[in-house]
Image: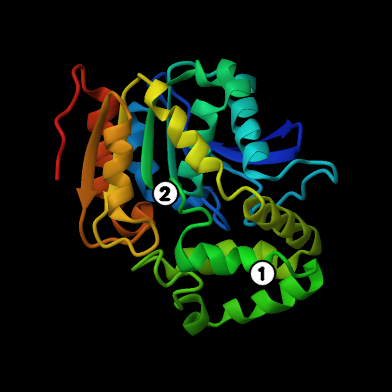
């Protein structure tokens, strides 16, 4: 049974869901303007044999405003993930990230200052995510980060148009991110549409992303040092995260396998949750490395 919990970290109160149990720990990180519900259907499939933990990071869909001095840059978010692993005393974790969550996975396991937390990670799963110089990613990411230049009040006013489905389905919003997940994206936007404090946090997040455009290029230089098992799951139709980047990541990581999925955009947990859950289950439970699948 999934339990909704909160934990008070350095940056502020973080909400997370935890299925509990004695199975292997899987921590799943959502992306920008997304909450933990991104993985609901994936967790429902994995939970019977695995402990699944899904935090809602302060990326704009969170409910609890962060401390005024919180570092909400990408490196600050990675430190929050590291702190969460340490506070929950998790070992041999499978760390999963989709969209911006995948960028945070890369930062956690490559940043020298996070080596202690990285030692808690036994496997990583990168699911159609920011990589290399694609940060902020594609037209969608670049346009959203540009809105972070606005003062929080104007930022909130701009985002009010996202109440309209036709606007949410545009390429500059969620249109190229998911084929089937509009109901989820509408729900994720509610905090930033209705809460001034969350809008202030979101602007800080976007400005931090805009100031760190080369951080994943630097992370990629260090990825070959991650010698533990890695799974790269990518959408063949992805128009925001290049499928070629998925193949490059799989080639960079010494012990990696690649799965490419059809009929999905970037947010595979929404568009193809059963296929993603199957890929993660096989990867986590396999006693020997699984073959590359295309």
Residue at left 56%, top 69%? Answer: 143
SS for dot 1: helix
Residue in front for this viewpoint, 92 or 71: 71
Circles 1 and 2, Cβ within 8 Å, touching? The answer is no
- Tell me the residue that label 1 is attached to: 147
Q: Earlier in the sequence, mark 1 or mark 2?
A: 2
Specify whether residue 29 is in view.
no
Q: Residue furthest right?
A: 68
Quadrant of the frame with the C terminus: top left
Within 10 Å of disc 2 (Cα), the crowding (few <14, some 14-19, many 20+) is many
How far across and how far down the image is residue 66, in percent? Answer: 77, 46
Residue in front for this viewpoint, 285 or 223: 223
Residue in front for this viewpoint, 125 or 88: 125
- Residue 156 placement, left or right of 212: right
The total of numbered circles placed on residues is: 2
Residue at left 62%, top 47%? Answer: 212
Within 10 Å of disc 1 (Cα), the crowding (few <14, some 14-19, many 20+) is some
Residue 21 falls in which quadrant of the image?
top left
3D distance between C-alphas at marks 1 and 2: 21 Å
- Residue 115 placement, left or right of 270: right
Q: Which mark is residue 129?
A: 2
Residue 270 falls in which quadrant of the image?
bottom left
Residue at left 40%, top 62%? Answer: 240
SS for dot 2: strand
How far across and how far down the image is residue 193, in percent? Answer: 69, 70
Specify whether residue 6 is in view.
yes
How far across and how far down the image is residue 216, in percent? Answer: 50, 42
- Residue 168 placement, left or right of 67: left
Residue at left 48%, top 16%? Answer: 91
Residue 71 falls in which quadrant of the image?
top right
- Residue 280 placement, left or right of 126: left
């Amino acid at each position: 049974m999934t339990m909704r919990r909160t934990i008070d970290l350095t940056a502020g109160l973080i909400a997370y869901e935890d299925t509990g149990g004695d199975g292997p720990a899987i921590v799943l990180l959502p992306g920008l303007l997304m909450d933990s519900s991104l993985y609901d259907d994936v967790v429902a499939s994995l939970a019977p044999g695995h402990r699944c933990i899904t935090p809602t990071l302060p990326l704009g869909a969170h409910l609890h405003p962060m401390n005024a001095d919180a570092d909400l840059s990408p490196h600050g978010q990675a430190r929050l993930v590291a702190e969460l692993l340490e506070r929950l005393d998790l070992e041999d974790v499978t760390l999963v990230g989709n969209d911006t969550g995948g960028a945070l996975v890369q930062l956690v396991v490559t940043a020298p200052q996070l080596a202690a937390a990285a030692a808690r990670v036994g496997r990583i799963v990168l699911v159609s995510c920011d990589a290399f110089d694609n940060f902020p990613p594609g037209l969608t990411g670049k346009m959203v980060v540009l809105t972070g230049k606005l003062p929080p009040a104007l930022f909130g006013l701009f985002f009010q148009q996202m109440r309209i489905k036709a606007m949410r389905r545009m390429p500059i919003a969620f249109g190229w991110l998911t084929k089937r997940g509009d109901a989820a994206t509408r729900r994720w936007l509610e905090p930033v549409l209705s809460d001034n404090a969350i809008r202030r946090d979101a602007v800080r997040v976007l400005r931090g992303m805009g100031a760190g455009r080369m951080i994943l290029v630097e992370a990629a230089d260090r990825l070959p040092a991650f010698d533990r098992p890695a799974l790269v799951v990518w959408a063949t139709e992805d128009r925001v995260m290049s499928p070629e980047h998925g193949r490059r990541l799989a080639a960079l990581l010494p012990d990696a396998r690649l799965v490419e999925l059809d009929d999905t955009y970037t947010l595979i947990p929404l568009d193809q949750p059963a296929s993603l859950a199957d890929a993660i289950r096989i990867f986590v439970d396999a006693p020997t490395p699984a073959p590359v699948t295309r």
